[in-house]
Image (tube, helix red, strand yellow):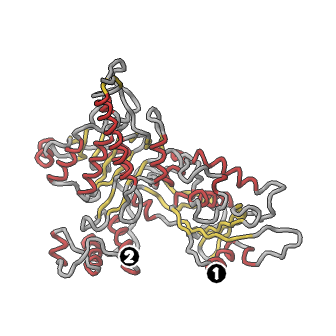
Amino acid sequence: MIKYLSGAALLSACLGLMTTSPAQAATLIYNTTESQDALDSRYGGAVTAEQLTGKYADCTLLYDGDVTPGDLQKFQAIYEYNGLPEGARLCLNSRGGRLYEALSIVDFLRDSFADLQTYVAEDDRCASACSTLFLAGAHTFEGESYETIAMRAIAPTARLGVHAPRIVLPNYGELYDADEVEAVYDDAIRDSALLFAFAQKADDEGTPYLTPYLYARSIETPPQEMYYLTTVADALFSQIPVTGISYDVTLNTDLITSICHNAFLMDDGAFTWSFAPTWKPHRLASFEEFWPNFVEIVRSTYQPDAPQFATDVQIEQKDGAIYGVQRGYPVGGPYYAEDCLVRLPTSAEVGEQTSFGIIRDAWDARISPDIDIRIGTQYPRGPHSLPEPDHVATPYSYWQYESATSDSEPHSYPTLMLFPMGQPLADLPHIPEPTQTTETPEAPHTQRLSCDDLWYHRNRIFHENGYCFSSERGIATFGNEGCFTKSPELSGRDAELMQIIKAGEKELGC
């Protein structure tokens, strides 16, 4: 018999905790003023009754502690009994736990079309296995399986962390036989396969729950360490909204340069970075890996022996928007460079500080105005070159020219791109906590509509596109005669109206 590590101890292979202290089973707290007895009668003892305040005041559930066996049964009890209110929020504060248990909860919530958003509050930690629960946060619209969209967010000072699974040995003096080691190894491979499968899943709008960037960080980070999402780059590449912030910026050339740098970093290969391997080690490299090389190449354009490309940056206010251009990104060796054109939807003047929105929750982040970027091409300049064409003289004329002559659509980016990629999330402009007297602005085009009105119009669009209802209300109102799909494809005006209706429902708290 071969003696080796593990056995029962190696069953902790996917525990993933940053500490060797014993696991502290999570408490699942339901935010309510009801008694414990009343809650037990509704959820079979799966949750603890407590009225949450402060940073947890908007949480429906608070998951506080380690992911341990038996947590799946708690969530099953919740949804098999009475479920949770629409738009429920699960707040997470956990150092990690059993990855397999977390993945099992994720699969259950997905299969149940659970309408459960996730959030990590200020100064809280959601690491290791907890991050899997967090990433699975989603909002499901009426009809359950019709449309599920990723809905998760972190506060600026929250710590969302990932790392590779860890083997925890409570007794390093023990020896274990080969069969025991093989069994635990099989479990580790199983969990790794499940995590990989999770990384392939996306919501109904194509947003991956676990992006390739974040999956790479989780695999490459040693189990004794933790990769925390701490920068704007981490949030952008992981597609994690940051809430509790204001998009306050000053409209100047530094802003244009920052946005353009971000765009080229985000869209490796989307433009024509012919020499990308010279500044990015590989497509899934971390920000810390590729940023120094990117800066070196961009700075090289300003050296005396660099190709004679225009490298100026300009900004102007025109027709109710800010237009900017940063020229001279070297993408084709000595043969040509690309110019980055930016359009920002604001009537503020150049030099002013303005806000592009206040982000209180994940929905705010989704509906905040996009940043549009177009790309122009320039060729090296020499003493005998012809004058540059007139359209490159100003950012506005350059944008209009590219809009009229280019076959490609502008690239659109989330508003978080206003901030430099290397900026710490904790340093983003914070907003004060909402008060009871804070008035919520009504959504455009929905100011005179009630929640019932919005529900009717949203589901009328579904019905007209062949949707088969599951809810009693939907069947009673529209019926299922002639229906043929649970996932109708909306386009044109229907798709536009659907986005307006959803925004209105969120603003009204439907």
Q: Badge 2 local density, few (<14 within 10 Å), some, or many (20+)? A: few
Q: Is residue 37 left or right of residue 220?
A: left
Residue at horizontal 75 percent and vertical 66 percent from the top:
335
- For the point 63% across and 54% down, which residue is it? 277
Three-letter residue code for mark 1: Thr
Please determine whether, in this image, residue 307 is positioned above or below residue 180.
Answer: below
Say whether residue 54 is visible: no
Work out whether 163 lies above or below 443. above
Mark 2–mark 1 Cα distance, whole angstroms, equals 27 Å
Residue 404 on image: x %, y %: 62, 81
Confirm or deny contact between disc 2 and disc 1 (CB under 8 A): no
Residue type, numbered disc 2: Ala
Residue on which the image places disc 1: 405
Residue identifier under label 2: 495
* Relative image position of residue 46 (x, y in whole percent): 18, 43
User: What is the secondary structure assignment of the residue under circle 2?
Assistant: helix
Q: Would residue 171 appear left or right of 356 to someone viewing this image?
A: left
Residue 160: give x, y in percent of width and height: 43, 43
Q: Earlier in the sequence, mark 2 or mark 1?
A: 1
Identify the residue shown where x is 37% and y is 57%: 201
Q: Is residue 195 visible?
A: yes
